[in-house]
Image: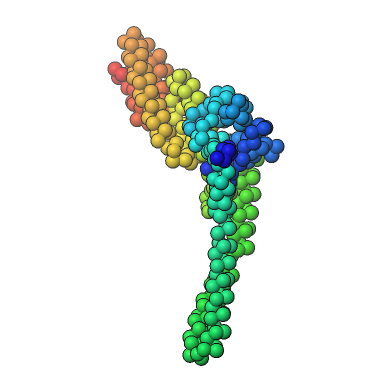
């Protein structure tokens, strides 16, 4: 029976289908740096993200204090974890499947990966060549046997030739050079966005990544830009929500709602839209509760004869409540107090 060969198969990432063998006599490292055994060229992957090694006959995965963490079957690991065949290992947006295979299975997997990368069309090309050779041979034999059959074969070959020429002309008309230039421009925009992100300006980077997605849809760079934009937006969202909570604690709901509106202007991915709506509803409920508390405090001040104190409360609430209907109520209360109403 063949010895079981451990491998990593790329399920999602820059090279889907690629197979990496894991040697038993040395440690296999994974990360963004080219010095890793398995390089993962993704900006959100750490330079040396994690490692896999055979320890006492068992394969162990060890996270190297990576920034985004290492997940096994969706669960973030802490330190080392023993791997089982079929488990999924995620490094940011790149996913591997750990497998223990017989040598024959490894070869089959490698062959499938090669075919998926474009060898199959070449095989078909060879088959077409053999078919055409057969047609030519039959044509020569037909000349000797029957002129009528030769005429039919010639007509058939002529039709095939005309169709091949028409197909060649249609292919030649395709703007190949234009497509290459589009890919190059998309890559330049993507690189510029990454440079902005590396400089720490996440907001500008989001705008540039969105522009690459919009202006160069269908290119490889646009697909990568969509992935990085989603990851970056979630990081910005977490930072902004922390500031929003601080503004709410200070009863400055106008500022909290303004920060959430800025997030909306960044065109959030669909996965974040529902969360943003829920967060805004929560802030509005807090604003209503805060305004009712202001009304109660102002009422007590008016009863005690301190109309000016009540006016100050309503002016502050008007500037900080952030909800249009509540701001309108604050203006009404101030008008009543200023004209001698009972508030």
- Left or right position of 209 against 35: left
Which residue is depicted at the point 58% across and 30% down?
A: 59
Look at the picture and state if 328 lies above or below 268.
Answer: above
Residue furthest to the top:
304
Residue 251, image x, y percentages: 44, 20
User: Which residue appears at 38% of the width and 20% of the height?
Assistant: 290
Task: Look at 35% across and 30% down and name the residue there.
Answer: 325
Q: Is residue 247 visible?
A: no
Kindly indicate the quadrant of the structure image that contains residue 32: top right
Query: Which residue is at the front of the view, 177 or 165?
Result: 165
Along the viewing direction, whichever of 325 and 119 lies nearer the viewer: 119
Q: Position of residue 272 (x, y in %)?
A: 45, 36
| Residue 216 percent coordinates (x, y) | 55, 53
Quadrant showing the C terminus = top left
Position in image of residue 316 (x %, y %): 43, 21
**Residue 199 falls in image quadrant:** top right
């Amino acid at each position: 029976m063949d010895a079981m060969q451990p491998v990593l198969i790329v399920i999602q990432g820059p090279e889907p289908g690629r197979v990496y063998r894991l040697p038993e006599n040395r440690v296999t490292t994974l990360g963004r740096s080219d010095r890793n055994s398995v390089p993962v060229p993704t900006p959100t992957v750490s330079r040396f993200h994690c490692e896999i090694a055979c320890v006492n006959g068992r394969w162990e995965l060890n996270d190297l204090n990576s920034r985004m963490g290492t997940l096994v079957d969706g669960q973030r690991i802490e330190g080392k974890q023993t791997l089982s065949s079929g488990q999924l290992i995620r490094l940011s947006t790149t996913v591997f499947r750990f497998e223990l295979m017989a040598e024959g299975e490894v070869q089959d997997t490698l062959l499938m990966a090669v075919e998926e990368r474009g060898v199959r069309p070449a095989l078909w090309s060879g088959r077409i060549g053999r078919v055409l050779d057969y047609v030519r041979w039959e044509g020569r034999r037909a000349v000797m046997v029957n002129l009528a059959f030769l005429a039919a074969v010639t007509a058939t070959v002529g039709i095939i030739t005309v169709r091949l020429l028409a197909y060649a002309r249609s292919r030649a008309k395709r703007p190949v050079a234009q497509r290459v230039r589009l890919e190059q421009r998309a890559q330049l925009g993507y690189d510029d966005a990454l440079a902005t992100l590396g400089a720490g300006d996440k907001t500008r980077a989001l705008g540039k990544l969105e522009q690459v997605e919009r202006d160069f849809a269908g290119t490889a760079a646009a697909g990568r830009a969509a992935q990085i934009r989603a990851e970056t937006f979630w990081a910005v969202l977490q930072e902004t929500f922390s500031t929003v909570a601080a503004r709410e604690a200070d009863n400055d709901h106008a500022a909290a709602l303004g920060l959430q509106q800025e997030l909306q202007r960044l065109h959030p991915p669909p996965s974040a839209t529902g969360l943003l709506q829920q967060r805004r509803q929560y802030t509005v409920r807090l604003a209503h509760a805060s305004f009712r508390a202001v009304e109660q405090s102002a009422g007590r001040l008016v009863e005690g004869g301190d109309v000016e104190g009540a006016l100050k409360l309503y002016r502050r609430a008007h500037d900080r409540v952030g909800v249009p209907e509540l701001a309108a109520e604050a203006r009404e209360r101030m008008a009543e107090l200023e004209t001698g109403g009972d508030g």
